[in-house]
């Protein structure tokens, strides 16, 4: 015996309406964060000193990329017979090791 049509509509709304409301709240919060993002934090010079002293400090992606640019600018050019391809990026190697 099939339930009445009204019961099917009520069950659908009990499931669909909360899911739609949650997705709408999630989309609204995401849009707000994209439009009104927090200001970037200023570079804390004590963080580099603490890292040099051996303490653990939080690292941002910007810090990693700045270190990589500095390391690549100081690297010596590779000598070889043929044209050199682009150097392998250490972040890709790290990602590959973590993935596999």
Image (cartoon, rainbow, N blue to C red):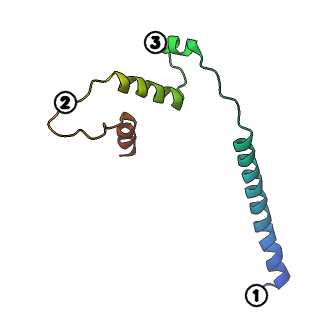
Crowd tier of the residue under label 3, counting other residues whose Cα lies within 10 Å: few below 14, some 14–19, many 20 or above: few
Front position in the image: 25 or 65: 65
Position of 51 compared to 45: left or right? left
Tell me where residue 97 sits by quadrant: top left
In depth, the one of 22 and 32 nearer the eye is: 32
Residue 38 locus on image (x, y percent): 71, 33
Q: Which mark is residue 19?
A: none
Q: Nearer the viewer, residue 20 or 90?
A: 90
- The residue tagged 2 is 79
Look at mark 1 in the image and give the residue it sits on: 2
Q: Identify the residue under disc 3.
A: 52
What is the C-alpha distance between the residues marked 1 and 3? 72 Å
Secondary-structure class at tag 2: loop
On the image, the x and y values in percent for residue 93 come to 35, 38
Residue 54 appears anywhere in the view:
no
Does 63 sit above or below residue 80?
above
Tell me the residue at 83%/74% (across/down). Answer: 10
Comes first in the chain, label 3 or label 2: 3
How far from the left and from the top, in percent, is residue 41? 65, 24
| SS type, badge 3 | helix
Does residue 8 sit above or below 19 in this rendering? below
Q: Nearer the viewer, mark 1 or mark 3?
A: 3
* Residue found at the very far right of the displayed protein: 6
**Among the 4 quarters of the image, the one containing residue 19:** bottom right
- Say if residue 58 shows up in the picture: yes
Residue 88 vs residue 31: left or right?
left
Between discs 1 and 3, the one toward the N terminus: 1
Dots 2 and 1: beta carbons under 8 Å?
no
Residue at 24% across, 38% down: 84
Q: Which residue is at 60% across, 16% downward?
A: 44
């Amino acid at each position: 015996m099939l339930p009445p049509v009204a019961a099917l509509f009520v069950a659908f709304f009990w499931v669909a309406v909360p899911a739609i409301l949650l997705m709408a709240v999630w989309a609204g919060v995401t849009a707000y964060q994209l439009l009104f993002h927090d200001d970037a934090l200023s570079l804390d010079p004590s963080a580099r000193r603490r890292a040099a002293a051996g303490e653990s400090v939080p690292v941002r992606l910007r810090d990693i990329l700045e270190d990589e640019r500095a390391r690549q600018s100081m690297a010596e050019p590779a000598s070889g017979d043929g044209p050199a391809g682009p150097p392998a990026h250490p972040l890709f190697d790290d990602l590959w090791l973590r993935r596999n």
